[in-house]
Amino acid sequence: MATCLPGCPLGIDIPGFIRLLREGDTALALERIKKENPFPAICGRICPAPCEDACVFNADGEPIAIRGLERYASDFGQSKLEKPHLAPRGSKKVAIIGSGPAGMSAAYYLAKMNIGVTIFEAAHEPGGLLRYAVPGFRLPQRVIDEQFSQLRSAGVEVQTDVVLGRTMMIDELFMQGYSALLLATGASLPIFSKLPGSSLAGVYYDMEFLNRLQLINKEDIDRPARQQGIPAAKTVVLGWGNTAFDAARLCARLGSEVHVVFEGFEEQAGVDAEILKESKEEGVELHSMQALEMVGDENGFVRGVKCRKLEIVEGKDALKLELSLEEPVVLEARTVIIANGQRPNDFLKQYLPQLKWDEDGSLWADAQSGMTSMERVFGCGSVMTAGGSVVSAIAGGKAAAQKIIQYLNVASS
Amino acid sequence: MYKIIYKQVIAQGIKKIDIMAPAIAARALPGQFVMVTPVSGEHNIPMTIIDSDEKRSVVSVLVHEVGSATRQLGGLSIGEAVYQVVGPLGRAAEMDKYGLVICVATGIGAAQILPICRGLKKKGNKVIGIIGAKSKNELMLEPQMRVVCDEIFITTNDGSYERKGLATGLLKELLDKYTVQRVYAIGSVEMMQAAARMTEEKNIALRVTLNPYMVNGLGLCGSCRVKIDGQYRLACVDGPQFDGHKVDYNDLSQRMNASEPVQWENHAPRVSPKRPGLGTFVKSLWVSVKK
């Protein structure tokens, strides 16, 4: 029994596609992946690969590089002669708010079932956080553009510069004949930190920092980086997780000296071993410390972070980290990036007060029908889970699409 | 899309631009703003909608040419299109019939106070406007303000026009003289802080408009966080108007500071639009005729 299978939220037939790759049939392998995952080019690059964690080879050695194989299949298995499949539009239309991975995957599965799909995106280019947060060295712009051209050729319409609740109201959408609305607005608003001095100039949150650099063009960040003085100065990243390491690696690649500070062991960094290894190679230094406060100068600019070291202590059954009794040290920095996790945008709560929210800040939906507390309004992706990986967003979009199809079928019969 | 249909120089380095945007013009309310990207590859600028005309499907914004993006926008001529306009964003200004209202603005804040004054007037309030400027040639929107306010006072720091002094000094005088129901203040942090102190003494409601550094205006990044009543709020989603007595002004000045020297615009190379104007065209014609 392959243990990687339950590891994948999308349920890709992993042993199956690897067998096809071994037999040399890359195109067929890609087809096998695409059965369950519409965007192998994205997952092959930035998926946290829970399947590799579940791999049987993990017990005595390194797991099989499933993500790498997926990327290979997606890059080389694409048939050049493949005709775009133009889905005939059915009479039903669904509006999707947000063009991130969750919205993309829902659009793909709805369009496949001959349902007309329009994605509304507030920014000028679709892709959501894939475009504005994930750095270009992990996911090039070209890959995102390719996915959208494939979606468009499958009959999905994308409207940019439209903000739900500001440019377009929800009633108008229903008046235009959309039978259902899917909220895939994601969760990108940073959870604000209570550390003293987090208002100093030069202190950014992870999303804010990535957004500032990459809003214009993520392949060409030299100018915004130079204007913020990143290459020459030292950077401290407080926190862990993918966005923390994305920001840290981005700074390191720009020539800054980067220290990542978080409370915990290296293995608890919230990223897979490959990213950890690569970021060390790029010169990112990791510290197990507790951040106490930011140190600023008289003009209100950040100059460093005061931290207390953590020491490894032997606990009852495992090693533990405890605060050291040494004097706190000050890590010098001109840029401090706080990675404190994200939550859904507040605007949705303001605009649609009738929506019900869970205690952890995620959108509530009925488990059976997938519908939120508003009639005809569904949700998927990070807005439902208050953060998560790309692969879980794609899985969420897929599940929501099935729920919507089920709802539309019931409504029409 | 987003064609510029009219452009006018209002004051030194300040231009009023009318942009065609039907969806935005139909919805814009006083106090809301738009995010404008002048050309592809530039970053976007938050701009207050100073006027919107649904029949002509036009929104008007005021461009203060201080950085690369704003200079690019100011350099676009009538008939050209702006790359992207998103909006209307932010909450509309809170307004009702209150009675006597004072609206005070300094510098570029005059652009933000104008739609609020107009809205208040429409609701049936008596509106007293105060605009402060450094000098006469930096004063703007005076005629427009005269139309929408019942009474208007102008102060200049150097005394080159009307009264010499600060707008807050005049505000204090007026607060002593009349029973005022509400004050709207837009300007520098010090000015708004002073207004907050004055109104708090007299127990008068104060609304301020904050302008922290904004990245995308959609509530996604938290760049425009301001501390209100001990909690962080986003100026792009919850604002830009806030209760002036609840704003943490020390925190705000730190946040505003954040955008100053490191601000992208100030470090960007000066970009002048490379487009031959009518002048050069006529000159070249003249040269060819002379030959």
Image: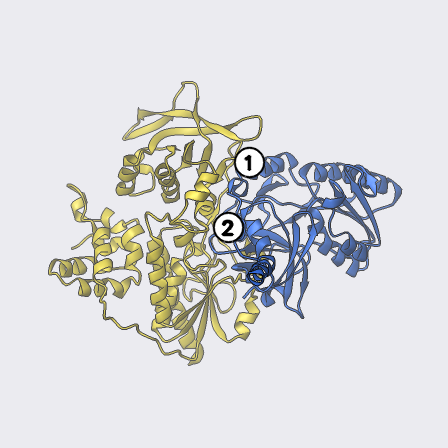
Residue at point 34%, 32% (across, down): A286
What residue is shown with label 2? B43
Q: Amino acid at mark 1?
A: Pro
Front residue of A175/B151: it is B151
How far from the left and from the top, in percent, is residue B185? 73, 45
Crowding at dot 1, Cα within 10 Å, few <14 / some 14-19 / many 20+, comes out as some
From the viewer's perspective, is A160 left or right of B280? left
Chain B pictured colour: blue
The outermost residue toward the left is A23
Q: Are marks 1 and 2 on the same chain?
A: yes
In the picture, which quadrant includes the N terminus of chain A? bottom left
* Residue A352 in view in this figure: no
| Left or right of B153 on screen, residue B71 | left
The chain letter under disc 2 is B
Quadrant in which residue A84 is drawn: bottom left
Disc ID at residue B261: 1
In the picture, the quarter occupied by the C terminus of chain A is bottom left
Which numbered disc, 1 or 2, marks the residue that appears first in the sequence?
2
Q: Colour of chain A?
A: yellow
Q: Residues within 10 Å of mark 2 (few under 14, many from 20)?
A: many
